[in-house]
């Protein structure tokens, strides 16, 4: 499974570790992905979504449990 957001497509970015001696080695920064149950094409499905998409409301989370979303 790729480390990509299912909504916006955000993936890892690349750069360097820079040591005190100014040696540079390649490193990666990963997006903060969370596994959530979301409504995809009208059905609940587990997808990996970045936290910015969750906070902005781009993801419709699926209800859980028997009678979920019903008064009690």
Image: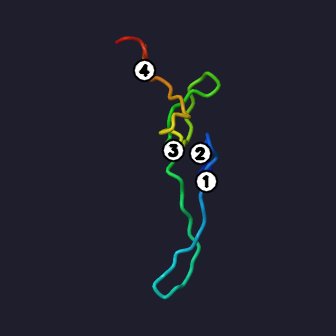
Residue underneath mark 2: 5
Q: Is residue 42 above or below residue 31?
A: above
The answer to which quarter of the image holds residue 26 is bottom right
Task: Report helix, strand or loop for mark 2.
Answer: loop
Q: Is residue 47 above or below residue 4?
A: above
Q: Mark 3 and mark 2: span between their CA atoms?
A: 10 Å
Residue 23 screen position, x and y as percent: 54, 84
Residue that sits furthest to the left in the current view: 72
Q: Is residue 39 above or below residue 13?
A: above
Mark 1 vs 2: CB contact within 8 A? yes
Q: Nearer the viewer, mark 4 or mark 3?
A: 3
**Residue for point 62% across, 50% down:** 2
Residue underneath mark 3: 52
Front residue (pair 14, 52): 52
Q: Residues within 10 Å of mark 2 (few under 14, many from 20)?
A: many
Q: Nearer the viewer, mark 1 or mark 4?
A: 1
Mark 1 vs 3: CB contact within 8 A? no
Q: Mark 1 and mark 4: span between their CA atoms?
A: 32 Å
Residue 4 screen position, x and y as percent: 61, 49
Residue underneath mark 4: 65
Residue 42 disc label:
none
Q: Mark 1 and mark 2: span between their CA atoms?
A: 7 Å
Q: Quadrant of the C terminus?
A: top left
Q: Mark 2 and mark 4: span between their CA atoms?
A: 26 Å
Residue 11 disc label:
1
Task: Report helix, strand or loop for mark 4.
Answer: loop
**Residue for point 56% across, 69% down:** 27
**Residue for point 62% across, 43% down:** 8
Residue 7 screen position, x and y as percent: 61, 40
């Amino acid at each position: 499974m790729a480390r990509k957001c299912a909504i916006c497509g955000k993936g890892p970015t690349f750069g360097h570790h820079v040591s005190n001696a100014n040696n540079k080695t390649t490193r990666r920064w990963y997006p903060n992905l969370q596994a959530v149950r979301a409504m995809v094409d009208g059905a609940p499905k587990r997808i990996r979504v970045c936290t910015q998409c969750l906070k902005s409301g781009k993801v419709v989370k699926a209800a859980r449990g028997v009678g979920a979303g019903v008064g009690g």
